[in-house]
Amino acid sequence: MNTPLVPANVDLTDFDWMPFDFQRLFGSDTWALSNDAEKVAAFTLWGKSWYQRPAGSLPSDDRILASVQFSGAMTRWKRVKDMALRGWRLCDDGRYYHPVVCEKALEAWLEKLAKRLSSGAGNAKRWDIEFDPTAIEADIDVARRFLMALNPQSRALTRRRPSGIPSGQKKPPTGNAGGIPPGIPPGSQETRTGTRTGTETFNSVGNPSGNTNTEGVGEGSSAQFPAHVAAAIAMRQAGVHDAHPQFEPLHQFIAEGGRVEAIEAVAAQAVRDGKGRMAYVVGKARGQLQDAMRSPGAGTAKADQQAALEQTNRDTAADWAGVVIEPEESHATH
């Protein structure tokens, strides 16, 4: 049996970097024996596998692999296939796994889980709610076992093992397993985390906007907190990772009568188009709003929208006093 080299839920689609051990690479047989075309093919597969689910794996269908390399040209793919797939293992789930890429993926996954654990505990303390770290700690234990099998000397295994911090409250738990209050989507207080599992092929590689979880975003939940905060959370939920409620143009968008639903739709499309930055999304949404306001009857609609937004903010400002969505942290490259 060839067991997959990483757990099925290892998801790094929200990481914008991939570590390379160039000393190992340049000393490898693959590098020594490959021609230029084969090296390019190998590099491409390593990079594409990082954004697969599970990370470090590839589909075993030659048609998909050929489409990645040569826009479907099977003859060209077959010329480089043997060397490009050197070191990959075909496992029982029908996917290829590369031991070195999987090792690096597990190290990044452990970092991600540790941050999620710390964030959940911190949110529980901040909002005085319960936090159950059991599921995250179980994922950490499983990931460590997989990494131990690949590289017992990995520095990730020598770091102090993180642990959850129970809140000590005995009241019925509220919110979710991440220690986040109701109405705030997972990920709005922790950065670069994801919960999607399973496998996929290259049609969604590099597009982390496929998350269909919209908890806390939209008409029903946006009334629970100020509109600019709801808009920032909606953008993060759509994949705009630098979204932050203190962005001045966002405040201007809300003041002009902009709606959370509108900026959420713009954000989702921008991420699909590879333009998922807050400045672009807010600018685009403001442009659409201004176009709409120039249409007949826009004055009455603007007044109604503004009144509704002001009432929302008045009703909820007290609940959000002192609550800050922390800016996104940047990962250090390895």
Image: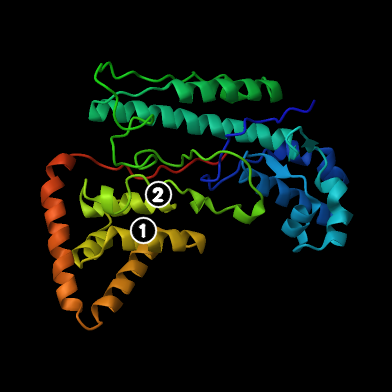
Relative placement, left or right, of 183 versus 117 is left
Q: Position of residue 243 (x, y in %)?
A: 35, 52
Q: Is residue 38 left or right of residue 287?
A: right
Residue 90: give x, y in percent of width and height: 79, 36
Q: Which disc number belongs to residue 264? A: 1
Question: Where does the C terminus fall, quadrant-wise?
Answer: top right
Amino acid carrying mark 1 in the image: Glu
Residue visible at 78% across and 57% down in the picture: 66
Mark 2 / mark 1, whichever is N-terminal: 2
Q: Quadrant of residue 11?
A: top right
Q: CA distance from mark 2 to mark 1?
A: 8 Å
How many C-alpha atoms fall within 10 Å of the one at disc 1: few (<14), some, or many (≥20)?
Answer: many
Indicate whether 140 appears above or below 250: above
Q: Horizontal and vertical percent for residue 129? A: 26, 26
Rendered position, 69 above or below 176: below
Task: Determine if residue 133 is in view.
Answer: yes
Residue at figure coordinates x 78%, y 49% from the top left: 61
| Residue 294 sits above or below residue 282 on the image | below
Residue type for callout 2: Gln
Q: Nearer the viewer, residue 224 or 325?
A: 224
Which is nearer the eye, 246 or 313? Answer: 313
Please say whether residue 242 is visible from this viewpoint.
no
> Which residue carries the number 2 mark?
237
User: Is disc 2 placed on a helix, strand or loop?
Assistant: helix
Mark number, residue 324? none
Residue at 32% x, 45% y is 216
Q: How dense is the environment of label 2, judged by Cα within 10 Å: few (below 14), some, or many (20 and up)?
A: many
Asked if the residue under mark 1 is in contact with the one under mark 2, i.e. CB atoms within 8 Å, the reply is yes
- Residue 315 lies left or right of residue 8; in this view the side is left
Q: Secondary structure beneath disc 1?
A: helix
